[in-house]
Amino acid sequence: MHHLLVEHPGLQASVQDLGRVGFASQGVAPGGAADPLALRLGNRLVGNPEGASGIELTLLGGTFVAEAACTVVLTGLGVPGPWQVRDLRAGERLVVGRLGPGARAYLCVRGGIDVPPVLGSAATHLAGSFGGLGGRALRAGDRLPIGSAAAEPVQFRSFDPAQLPDYVAGPLRLVPGAQHAWFSRTAREALVAREWHVADHSDRTGVRLRGEPLPVPNRELLTEGVPPGALQVPPDGQPIVLGVDQPTTGGYPKIATLAAVDLARLGQLAPRVAVRFVWITAAVARHLQRQRAEVLDGLH
């Protein structure tokens, strides 16, 4: 079996796939790639199944060495497009510098990263210390086995993310959340009228926003289930948008939920960047998701 050597892991690199489905009732978040769109596209570029495991890089990139010839690609808004497939020679070093403007990049290797699945997924759950490589972030000296997940010939070796303009830029789209009616009209309008900034201590669990506080409802909420993308408003009025490693229950009222088509953008929000929102209906959100799927299905 061939391996990819981690020479330098950057800030926080981990093995991720498309996550775990069906374990929320047991308190296990879906996890997986914070930007699943970038991982899916990367896998398609190298001929893997869309859900094959890759390496998620955060903010600072990393350095990797191919111990044998292999085919790789870097995707995600953390690297400039177009994203190009590369054929690495044995011993060749791949250096990924500081990422930007997006927070994350995905290193996909033809064949996938071959680590044992836990609850049906190879995704690293850092808080729970399971999945991936020993349930932890990658370290210098780790040797990642390259598997045999590749099932298709490489059909296209380059993709320009500009083909998906709403993935690259624009306001994040919201549908009304479970407690939407608890919030005043002033609060609902202020959420989309104001510019917010991503707090430094945001992570895969949630993106914390900073700005003029929203008016909060004078009601208490019993703990209930929450999905990825839920926009909670705690008592300080500073919104939190839950990410892929979110707790499966929460007690803050949810004024909104991020449209599924924009969950990939959520995973790319870097600290201190500006964020704006816009309200859409659930029907429009479903249409946008179908439209995105049609674009991806048409790639060749």
Image: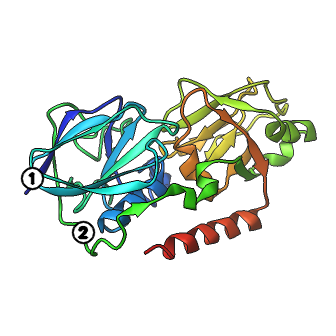
Colour approach in the figure: rainbow
Check residue 234 in the rendering and tell me which mark sits there, or answer none. none
> Disc 1 marks which residue?
68
Q: Mark 2 is on which residue type?
A: Ala
Q: Nearer the viewer, residue 71 or 52?
A: 71
Q: Mark 1 vs mark 2: which is more N-terminal? A: 1
Q: Residue at x 35, y 62 (%)?
A: 43
Q: CA distance from mark 1 to mark 2?
A: 16 Å
Residue 83 lies left or right of residue 142; in this view the side is: right
Check residue 150 in the rendering and tell me which mark sits there, or answer none. 2
- Quadrant hosting residue 175: bottom right
Q: Residue at x 71, y 31 (%)?
A: 196
Q: Nearer the viewer, residue 16 or 160?
A: 160
Q: Residue at x 36, y 56 (%)?
A: 84
In the picture, the quarter occupied by the N terminus is bottom left
Q: Residue at x 29, y 34 (%)?
A: 62
